Image (cartoon, rainbow, N blue to C red):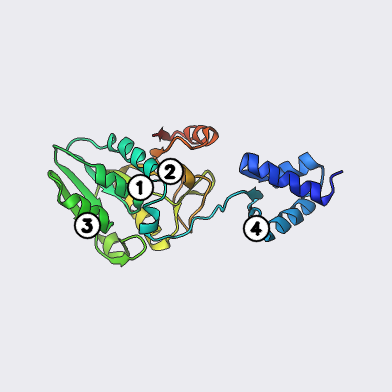
Amino acid sequence: MMNITDRHEFILKSLKEKGKITIDWLCETMKVSSVTIRKDLKVLEDKNLLFRIKGGASSSNPYAIDRPIIVKESINSEEKQRIAQAAIKLIKDNDSIMIGSGTTVFTLAKNIETTHALTVITPALKVGLELSGKPNIEVLLLGGLIRPNSSSVAGQYAMRVLDEISCGILFLGADGIDLEFGISISNLPEATLNQKMIETSQKIAILADSSKFGKRGLGKICELIDVDYIITDSKVSPNIVKSIEDLGIKIIVA
């Protein structure tokens, strides 16, 4: 039987290899009780060596944090560019689309060029300003209180406008994509607005780099099965891709 040092070494080695492990798997593998494993995980978490999650442990923090948009812009910028290029292919001639807030969907906005009429509805100031000077694009900017961290509006004023709107496809960013919890972001008012935007859209496309998988934000937007497309980068785990495709969701790896 393993002693406490051996167990801790095995747990940390397994986390390094797998990223996530379950209490049930640890119990079966090391032939110890769940009480013992929970104590081990608590000790290792107190030493900042892992993160405890429901039913197990993770090597990375599973919870997304709300960071200023200026900080997010420099993270995974090349991946966001490839994701944006893939997302553009979903936009049709003479389409009406909606673009949420966040750096990945802002990258999409920067790459949009069209010779046909395009209507864009958005709560994001940066998206609106980026597109307003481009030919053939009409921008409807939602109103409301501006959140400094995202440079985007949220609240009842924006919700009221959406009551009278319908669009072809909605492009949303996400702070977390979790197979159980669904799609989420780290701000509750924006999550509520995103839910309303989903109601007004025929198709939903989530744009998120691979670092967002396995994480959960504070505010849930929707279930995974409510989404039509997920566009991400090539660093995403093949197991995650298969799990998402099994739900009937089109995942595009850029």
Name the mark nearer the viewer: 3 or 4.
4
How far apart marks 4 and 2 lie (CA) works out to 26 Å
Name the mark nearer the viewer: 1 or 3.
1
In the image, residue 114 lies at what x, y percent? 17, 38
Q: Nearer the viewer, residue 161 or 237?
A: 237
Which tag, 3 or 4, sits closer to the chain's start?
4
In the image, what residue type sits under mark 1? Thr
| Residue at 38% in and 51% down | 74
Local crowd at mark 3 within 10 Å, few (<14), some, or many (≥20)?
Answer: many
How far apart marks 3 and 4 lie (CA) works out to 44 Å
Do the numbered discs 1 and 2 sit on residues whose CB atoms are within 8 Å? yes
| Residue at 39% in and 57% down | 71
In the image, residue 230 lies at what x, y percent? 40, 39
Do the numbered discs 3 and 2 sit on residues whose CB atoms are within 8 Å? no
- Which residue in the structure is indicated by mark 2? 209
- Which residue in the structure is indicated by mark 1? 104
Image quarter of the C terminus: top left
Which tag, 3 or 2, sits closer to the chain's start?
3
Q: Secondary structure at mark 2?
A: loop
In the image, what residue type sits under mark 2? Asp
Which tag, 1 or 2, sits closer to the chain's start?
1
In the image, residue 221 lies at what x, y percent? 42, 52
Local crowd at mark 2 within 10 Å, few (<14), some, or many (≥20)?
Answer: many
Is there any visible trace of residue 167 in the rendered image?
Answer: no
How far apart marks 1 and 4 lie (CA) works out to 30 Å
- Which residue in the structure is indicated by mark 3? 141
Q: Secondary structure at mark 3?
A: strand
- Which residue in the structure is indicated by mark 4? 48
Do the numbered discs 1 and 4 sit on residues whose CB atoms are within 8 Å? no
